[in-house]
Structures are given as C-alpha cells and as structure tokens.
Amino acid sequence: MFEQCLYFNTTSLARQLEREWTSAFKPFGLTPSQAFMLRVVLDKAPLLQSELALEMNISRPTTTRGLDGLEKLGFIKRVASEKDGREQEIHPTASALKIKVDLNTASGTVTKRMKKLLGTNEFESVVAQMRSITSALK
C-alpha cells in the first residue's frame, strides 16, 4: 500500500533506528536526540545555539528544549557570547568531556552493526541519498 510513499517509509525506518540508538545511549541517561546534540557540542564547541540548530537541521525552539535537558543533566553550560550579544555560547562540562569517547563508541557500535546487516556500500549509499534528499527539500 505504501511502497511508493517517502513519508511512510522514512518514518517507519526512523522508528526502528530510534530503538537502536535509544538502547545505545540508555547507559548515559540520554535520548538519541540529546546524545547527538551533545556529540555536536563536544566536537564543535564553543558554538552558538543558532549554529547548533543549523548543524542538526532542527528549529531553534527544539534546540532550546534539547539544551535545557542537557543542562539539567549537567552536560552543557551556556556562556554569554562575545560573537553575538543576543545569543549564548554552548560549552560541554567536565562531565560531558568524561563520556565523550564512550558516547562516540556507543554510536559507532550501532553504525558498525548496521553496516554489517546492510553491507557497507549499501549503508553509505543510503545515507548519502538521504542527505541529498534532505538538501533538495530545503
């Protein structure tokens, strides 16, 4: 019935992948959204909230909610920005830095399992196609 439906098939895949990454990030007390956001902060800090929203392809209000959660967990801190007085810079805390390697390893383990199931070439091709579609729809 939905063989040609991009929406149905991508959301179905998203639900399956959500379960995989939920399991991977559970030991850190993070949802997949929080974990990926924290990974960006750990890799690119300091960055403005608007830069984080752009990097993650999410709205600023969604970014704010994610950052609020990470701040409550003690993984990020917000500092007044010298680049833009209207925004705050996002910095990882010592707690976040402590889990950086393990967080990346957990995500990498899921990626390796997916590559093994699908084949590396197929996996990389699908990711590239999805990124291309995302760019085309902007």
Image (spheres, grey):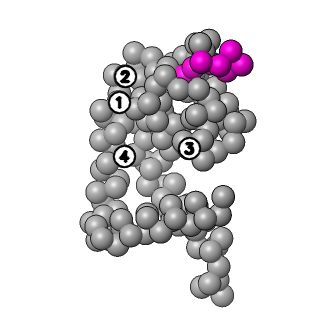
Identify residue type, mark 3.
Met
Q: Quadrant of the C terminus?
A: bottom right
Identify residue type, mark 4.
Ser
Query: Which residue position is annotated with label 4?
Result: 107
Identify residue type, mark 1.
Lys
The disc, 1 or 3, on the residue closer to the chain's N-terminal end is 3
**Magenta stretch: includes residue 119:** no
- Which element carries disc 1, helix, strand or loop? helix
Identify the disc placed on residue 52: none
Q: Nearer the viewer, residue 115 or 19?
A: 115
Query: Which residue position is annotated with label 1?
Result: 100
Main SS of the magenta part reads: loop
> Looking at this rendering, what residue extends furthest in the bottom direction?
1
Alpha carbon separation for disc pair 4 and 1: 11 Å
The disc, 4 or 2, on the residue closer to the chain's N-terminal end is 2
Identify residue type, mark 2.
Leu
Is the C-beta separation of discs 4 and 1 under 8 Å? no
Badge 3: few (under 14), some or many (20 or more) residues near its Cα, within 10 Å?
some
Q: Is residue 8 left or right of residue 14?
A: right
Badge 2: few (under 14), some or many (20 or more) residues near its Cα, within 10 Å?
some
**Vertical placement of residue 122 versus 19, above or below:** below
Q: Quadrant of the N terminus?
A: bottom right
Q: Residue at x 71, y 19 (%)?
A: 86
The disc, 2 or 3, on the residue closer to the chain's N-terminal end is 3
**Vertical placement of residue 121 versus 68, above or below:** below
Is the C-beta separation of discs 4 and 3 under 8 Å? no
Query: Residue 66, how many percent across, how many down?
Result: 61, 33
Is the C-beta separation of discs 1 and 2 under 8 Å? yes
The disc, 4 or 1, on the residue closer to the chain's N-terminal end is 1
